Amino acid sequence: MLLARTLVRDPELVLLDEPTAGLDVGGREQLVADLTRVATDDLAPPVVLVTHHLEEIPPGFTHALALRGGRIVASGAIGEVVTDEVLSETFGLRLRAAHSDGRWSARPG
């Protein structure tokens, strides 16, 4: 509902900082679905999403920026940023990135 209110004002850019914090799984998945529609709509404004949880990245998002301690670890096309090496450096532990059904995830590895 809040996303719809934001978009009805026809913004030039939408900034979302941890928008799923406090949501249950159903709410999170509804927001991810809504953001997927926005990401694939050529008339929608660009969306910047800040998250620590890869599974919250909606399908259709094309670029990523990984930060650690305020410095850029990597930036660019999402498939070039969401990698084992970049995630491991970003979060300070060995991680394996996975991409399945349009969604990203990371597990220890």
Image: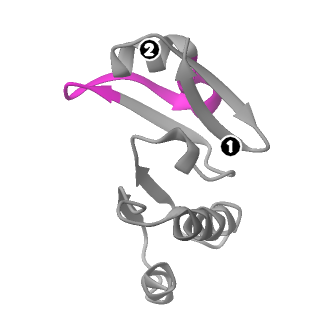
User: Is disc 1 placed on a helix, strand or loop?
Assistant: strand
Mark 1 neighbour class, 10 Å CA radius: few under 14, some 14 to 19, many 20 or more = some
Depicted 72 relative to depicted 85: above or below: below
Q: Residue at x 36, y 20 (%)?
A: 90
Quadrant in the picture for residue 67 = top left
Quadrant in the picture for residue 11 = bottom left
Check residue 77 for magenta coloring.
yes
The amino acid marked with disc number 2 is Ser
Q: Residue at x 43, y 61 (%)?
A: 20
Percent across and percent down for residue 63 are 55, 39
Q: Nearer the viewer, residue 86 or 46?
A: 86
Between disc 1 and disc 2, whose residue precedes? 2
Percent across and percent down for residue 94 are 46, 10
Q: Which residues are magenta?
A: 67-83
Drawn side of residue 83 relative to residue 6, left or right: right
Looking at the rendered structure, which numbered label has been put on residue 18? Answer: none
Q: Residue at x 33, y 14 (%)?
A: 92
Q: Nearer the viewer, residue 15 or 85?
A: 85
Which residue, given by chain and number where applicable, does mark 2 sit on? 88
Q: CA distance from mark 1 to mark 2?
A: 19 Å
User: Is disc 2 placed on a helix, strand or loop?
Assistant: helix
Quadrant assignment for the C terminus: top right
Depicted 89 relative to depicted 21: above or below: above
Depicted 52 relative to depicted 88: above or below: below
Which residue, given by chain and number where applicable, does mark 1 sit on? 103
